[in-house]
Amino acid sequence: MGLNLSRLVREIRELPTLPQVAVQIFNSLEDPRSSARDIERIMSNDPSLAGKVLRMVNSAYFGFPHRISDLGHAIVILGFAEVKALALSMSIIDLFGKTEGGAEAFDKTRFWRHSVAVANVARDEARRRGADAGVAFVTGLLHDIGKLVMDQYAPQDLGRICERSEADGCTYWQAERALAVVPDHAEVAGLLVENWRLADEVVEAVRYHHEPASAPASVYVALVRLGNHVAGDLDLLASGDHAGHPLDEDTRALLRLEEDQIPGIAGRLKQRIEAIDVFVDLTR
Ligand SMILES: [Fe+2]
Ligand SMILES: [Fe+2]
């Protein structure tokens, strides 16, 4: 008998909404007319978010030698896309990061470590290909967020999936298949980000990150799949995954990636692990 989570889908309509500030930031991410000053203005409506972004900018994650004390300066140094992605990440992490309870088998720190690692790979490889780095980062950060939703609203079901993946030595997604979970974490995440009115390419990539044939032209699906693959090699698997994610031919072809380029990508991610942990610390 499968796990039917349609109740969850109904509840998703009432799920945490993304703060208005984050929605505005995300929309300006896409709008070429928006300026650094717009972002400053939007973020000045949420001082705690602005404070967090500055804390992040000044953390070892970026490793700047001088203290950056205002957002305008941060935008100049880090770049527009980076500050927006950061602000959006902080809002999203805030929404879920601090929820108590949840399934015992689900490790939230591990979850965020994995998500931030995938976001990093997706962003860097997007840049190399002229794709939108901000969209890639956000997509990487959110791709597995359906698991957090399950942890909050259906922790027993999530626990069963995690137990199954551990027993079978497979990925969380394979365990969902084995248990006939409907909807799976990718679909739940897709519904959530759709509900948040994030850009279509983010919704699509989140929804199909385990089913690339459904979005064959999406470079963002491919970037997330690459991130999942590389993260698995570095002990940065997501919570609930007990096997790595092989890289399929179509994904490799879409990214014009040769097998021998993968160790380089993994090496760059490895150098970032300490910095990623600084980022993840901010989620606690
Ligand atoms: Fe996933
Ligand atoms: Fe993942």
Image (cartoon, helix red, strand yellow):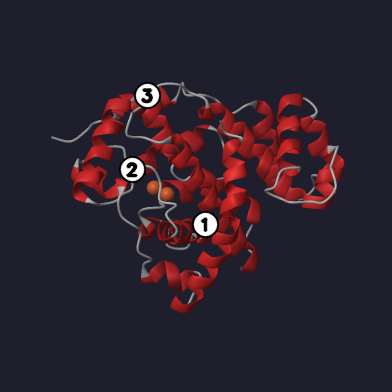
**Residue 124 relative to residue 8: left or right:** right
Q: Can residue 46 be seen from the camera position used here?
A: no
Q: Residues within 10 Å of mark 3 (few under 14, many from 20)?
A: some
Instruction: Decide which of 103, 5 is in the foreground and name it.
Output: 103
Comparing marks 3 and 1, which lies closer to the viewer?
3
Q: Amino acid at mark 1?
A: Tyr
Taking the spot 35% from the left edge, 55% from the top edge, the residue there is 211
Mark 3 is on which residue type? Answer: Tyr
Q: Which label belongs to residue 153?
A: 3
Q: Earlier in the sequence, mark 3 or mark 2?
A: 3
Q: Is residue 41 above or below residue 225?
A: above
At 46% across and 47% down in the image, what residue appears?
206
Q: Is residue 206 visible?
A: yes
238 or 139, which is in the foreground?
Answer: 238
Residue type pointed to by label 2: Gly
Q: Quadrant of the N terminus?
A: top left
Q: Give the residue at mark 1.
A: 220
* Left or right of 276 on screen, residue 168: left
Question: In this figure, which residue is indicated by the disc labeled 2?
Answer: 240
